Amino acid sequence: MKKKILVTGGAGFLGSHLCERLLNEGNEVICLDNYFTGQKQNIVHLLDNPFFELIRHDVTMPFFIEVDEIYNLACPASPIHYQYNPIKTIKTSVMGAINMLGLAKRIRAKILQASTSEVYGDPKEHPQTESYWGNVNPIGYRACYDEGKRCAESLFINYYRQNNVNIKIIRIFNTYGPRMHPNDGRVVSNFIMQALNNEDITVYGDGSQTRSFCYVDDLVDGMIRMMNTADDFIGPVNVGNPVEFTILELAQQVINLTGSKSKIIYEPLPSDDPLQRKPDITLAKNKLNWEPKVQLREGLMKTIQYFNSK
Ligand code: NAD
Ligand code: UDP
């Protein structure tokens, strides 16, 4: 059955892939974005589709529409972008959630929140399960994002408890792939751009901190599976790739795959930078019948190809 689906942040990296997938599955998609970090370029190939609509709007302002489902992705995601205007980042997470939940309540739509592994902060439990409450510095430089997203989760669960809104929460772990913003400062895009330009690869700290990298197609698959679960499963559920790498290993892999002449240099570790991160995806396996399929090497090759063609 064709559904009418609103995707906030639809012109961003993840949102553009999600819009594309939902259209390919035969749905009508309304993409809402204020283009803060997203770009029309990401969705220009969808504009010919009569079932795709593009709306310039800021989620901190109320918005009215009739849809069946809402995917709430609007929020800058890279540390450089979300720290550029931290107050706006908090407003986007919190007021965006209030506006979208209010809409979902009024029109009885199902609504999914794109939360983040950052709700675990610099985790004292490893790997992270959904039952872990996290270790977040509320006055640190990452707080505008982490606490904004934590507050959004709290809003979601309370709209569920108090108003019976049909909610879903996923906690997304580091995801990469084509259409990442080349200058957003995230590690995969930084290293690939540096390698392709034969510039120094900037490893922050000693590179022993870890992350687990999920390819975008896998992530979008998990997100849609979550939206389609039975109403009594609301999450939160971790969606990410559990294969863990050090940042130094990632740098070496990117140099190998690009055949770059770049050398690795070391720069200071930003404050509150989590030392390790790896999702426990047992819940996603059980409830969504989902696990990532794309290995880092294969995903990096596709991403390198994308950045090379830009
Ligand atoms: P992105 O920056 O590419 O996309 C975010 C989109 O939201 C952009 O198109 C931006 O213009 C839009 N936006 C920002 N503020 C807005 C506002 N006030 N009103 C309307 N639109 C606004 O980032 P992404 O990687 O695609 O992330 C999408 C979502 O997934 C975010 O909510 C992010 O927190 C979450 N997430 C992503 C990752 C990841 O690794 N990519 C990890 C965890 C969580
Ligand atoms: N990082 C790095 N060099 C860069 C960019 C990032 O060493 O040019 C490190 C960063 O300090 C962090 C990890 O890579 O430890 C992941 O950073 P990113 O900004 O991609 O996402 P995070 O998981 O920190 O939100």
Image: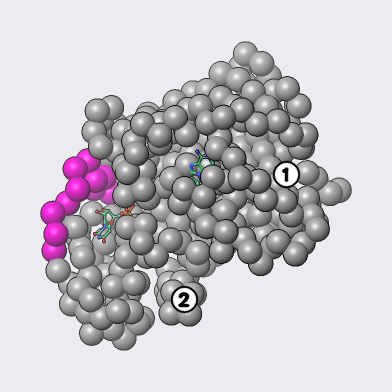
Kind of residue sitting beneath label 1: Ile
Query: Which contiguous range is marked in magenta?
Result: 266-278
Residue 171 vs 132, above or below: the answer is below
Determine the residue positioned at 19% across, 43% down: 271
Is residue 244 something that shows in the picture? no
Secondary element under disc 2, as helix, strand or loop, is loop
Q: Is residue 133 left or right of residue 206?
A: right
Please state which of residues 84 and 302 is positioned toward the viewer in this rendering: 84
Is residue 13 something that shows in the picture? yes
Please state which of residues 52 and 120 is positioned toward the viewer in this rendering: 52
Q: Quadrant of residue 175?
A: bottom left
Q: Position of residue 226 (x, y in %)?
A: 63, 43
> Does ligand 1 reach within 8 Å of label 2's beta carbon?
no
Q: Are the residues tagged 1 and 2 within 8 Å (C-beta)?
A: no
Query: How far apart are the alpha carbons under marks 1 and 2?
Result: 30 Å
Of the image marks 1 and 2, the number of the one nearer the N terminus: 1
Q: Residue furthest front?
A: 56
Give the residue at mark 1: 5
Secondary element under disc 1, as helix, strand or loop, is strand
Q: Is-magenta flag for residue 31?
A: no
Q: Is residue 42 left or right of residue 273?
A: right
Determine the residue positioned at 23% across, 84% down: 261
Give the residue at mark 2: 310
Kind of residue sitting beneath label 2: Lys
Q: Position of residue 112 (x, y in %)?
A: 61, 37
Instruction: Determine which of the numbered discs, if any, sits on residue 208 in the image.
Output: none
Q: Residue furthest right?
A: 1
Q: Quadrant of residue 232?
A: top right
